[in-house]
Image: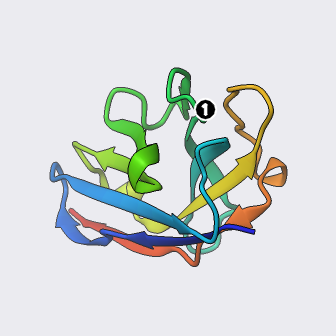
Amino acid sequence: QVQLVESGGGLVQAGGSLRLSCAASGRTFSRDAMGWFRQAPGKEREFVAGISWSGDSTSYADSVKGRFTISRDNAKNTAYLQMNSLKPEDTAVYYCAAVRTVLPVVMTRGSSYSNWGQGTQVTVSS
């Protein structure tokens, strides 16, 4: 099992930026696909971005393409989500997730992930 801890959330005005971090411990995550998901009040959890363990492949939800960037530093056992041009509709609890994969693929379904963090709140004011 890998333990995941998110950080970097907070309150920001529309148009601002935040950088979320997801620190992994317990074992190396260099062979784990990583993903970011979010859940707003009264809504279902949704996929935001994913990255393969090699870092060569990424995928984004249409709602964040061009504004968010997922990355990872395997040497630091950390994944990141850079969020720019934030909108009020980005307000949610953001979760990172990890799953070991044989091939360097991106996983976009929440049910594919076996490890989850506790989440970090992102609030974007208008």
Residue drawn at point x = 44 percent, y = 74 percent: 120
Q: How is the image coloured?
A: rainbow
Q: Nearer the viewer, residue 107 or 124?
A: 107
**Local crowd at mark 1 within 10 Å, few (<14), some, or many (≥20)?**
many
Which residue corresponds to mark 1?
52
Residue drawn at point x = 47 percent, y = 36 percent: 63
Number of on-image labels: 1
Q: Position of residue 17 (x, y in %)?
A: 19, 52
Residue drawn at point x = 51 percent, y = 21 percent: 56
Q: Nearer the viewer, residue 25 or 51?
A: 25
103 left or right of 74 in image = right
100 left or right of 121 in image = right
Q: Position of residue 49 (x, y in %)?
A: 53, 40
Q: Nearer the viewer, residue 80 or 62?
A: 80
91 left or right of 26 in image = left
Quarter holding the C terminus is bottom left
Q: Which residue appears farthest toward the top when viewing the image?
A: 56
The secondary structure type at the circle numbered 1 is loop
Residue 80, compared with residue 57, is above or below; it is below
Q: Position of residue 55 (x, y in %)?
A: 50, 29
Q: Position of residue 13 (x, y in %)?
A: 16, 62
Residue 29, compared with residue 61, is above or below; it is below
User: Picture quarter containing residue 33?
Assistant: top right
Residue drawn at point x = 19 percent, y = 55 percent: 14
73 left or right of 61 in image = left
Amino acid type at mark 1: Ser
Quarter holding the N terminus is bottom right
User: Picture quarter containing residue 67?
Assistant: top left
